[in-house]
Amino acid sequence: MSDTQGPSGPEPEPGPPSSAGPAGLSGDMDYRQGAVDLLGVLAYGALTAFERLAEDARMAPSLADKVYVATMAAHQIEHFARVRDRLAELNADVMVAMEPFHAPFDAFHEYTAPKDWYESLLKAYVGDGFAADFYREVAAFVDPDTRALVHEVLADEGHGEFVVEQVRSAIAEDPAKAGRLALWGRRLVGEALTQAQRVAANRDALTSLLTGTVDRPGMDLAAISRMFSRLIENHTKRMAKLGLQA
Amino acid sequence: MSDTQGPSGPEPEPGPPSSAGPAGLSGDMDYRQGAVDLLGVLAYGALTAFERLAEDARMAPSLADKVYVATMAAHQIEHFARVRDRLAELNADVMVAMEPFHAPFDAFHEYTAPKDWYESLLKAYVGDGFAADFYREVAAFVDPDTRALVHEVLADEGHGEFVVEQVRSAIAEDPAKAGRLALWGRRLVGEALTQAQRVAANRDALTSLLTGTVDRPGMDLAAISRMFSRLIENHTKRMAKLGLQA
């Protein structure tokens, strides 16, 4: 299975120098906490994605669509289980690791409750795609085993084509949908960034994975700005694939 | 993985003589349709179980409970996928195979919507246990490959202990719950039997798996009565395990 999902854009910035590699996991508490935080985000993200997709399955316009979305939901639980197992290897409890992220995820889902099937599809594709890109960027800064797991879990989301096909044919049938769905896509990214900022402000360990610490270099401001450009560029490509303006 | 789930009771009656065995699958159209019907029931049963468990996960009193029930839900989708693949081997489409069972399953779930977490747990344990016992009885009369798949899929339901523990401790805390839940258990089985009769009346191929045809012996009335005794006996054991009167 490849780790490209939809447009994947250029490779993320290289990680920290190898002196701060896997060995750092036990040595640098902040660094370990950063990895645990990233996995905690992924675990809670998978769990809430399961709930959302299960809810979407109820709204599915056909039984075949229901099966498809229910299968996507079930995959989220497999992802959750793999992340939980990795956390256990790092001597961290998944329930504890997820806790700091309840509030931002719950708020995100509360503010972005889809009103119909197409809003659901867009949320699964555009919202999750944006989040996955961001997690991959952060994963460049954790130990290789955790990084490999993150990439594997995120690669298994291949629902792109299903969504693209459905959204494009819906727009072809009713062109007015395009404007409304384009707005929805912007709103999803806006809410995601709002909640990400909230996380960044509260979780120093996670933030310092990206920015580095005195002992361990991270991204400088120019690199962070390039990262955001990559995220937005990939988002724009996904929207274009759907026939929507970002 | 063993195929015993909770009290499993005596082995089902032996299947038809081997002359009507796997070869019958291609030769006897009624027989093949019976196997396809059984798999169709299992597939639609798994899909509706997914939906119900996903809904239960929303009601879960703790995040750990939610994870547990969401994992049960995800397993149902794995079961669905395996049954769908077996149907494809028999040149049958899962969507078509499920169709005759939409109405009885949807009616069953409509009439037995759980009002709280404990009713949900009981439904998953007692209702699914009863259904699984019945499917195993019918599976004695299909080809060995289909039978093996049915047993494997039904074996993977090991949520017995989780439910038993939660229900028993809830009753210990509030003994009044026992009476209400005992009633609920009886109602679940009553509704299940009502819908099963509806299926039996409409699906000759499925019914004739049990009763046999001119060319292929099945159960006589005495054997069918013994089968019902086994089903009720196992149900009573499950209720007793929960500390409830059947």
Image (spheres, coloured by chain):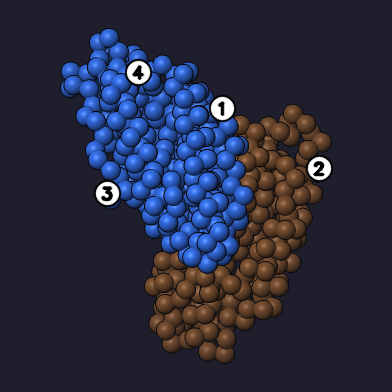
Chain colours: A blue, B brown
- Comes first in the chain, label 3 or label 4: 3
Closer to the camera, B105 or A151?
A151
Q: Which mark is residue B65?
A: none
Q: Does residue A38 appear left or right of residue A186 in this picture?
A: left
Residue visible at 56% across and 70% down?
B98
Residue hosting label 3: A2
Task: Name the amino acid type tagged 4.
Answer: Ser
SS state under label 4: helix
Whether residue A1 is visible to the viewer of this picture, yes or no, is yes
How crowded is the residue under tag 2: few (<14 C-alpha within 10 Å), some, or many (20+)? few
Task: Name the amino acid type tagged 3.
Answer: Ser
To which chain does the residue with label 4 belong? A
Q: Please, which residue is most extreme toward the top here?
A: A214
Q: Please, which residue is most extreme toward the left here?
A: A18
SS state under label 1: helix
SS state under label 2: helix
To which chain does the residue with label 1 belong? A
- Comes first in the chain, label 4 or label 1: 1
Q: Choose mark 2 or mark 4, whichever is in front.
A: 4
Identify whether A225 is placed above or below B208.
above
Whether residue B237 is visible to the viewer of this picture, yes or no, is no
Residue visible at 73% across and 31% down?
B172
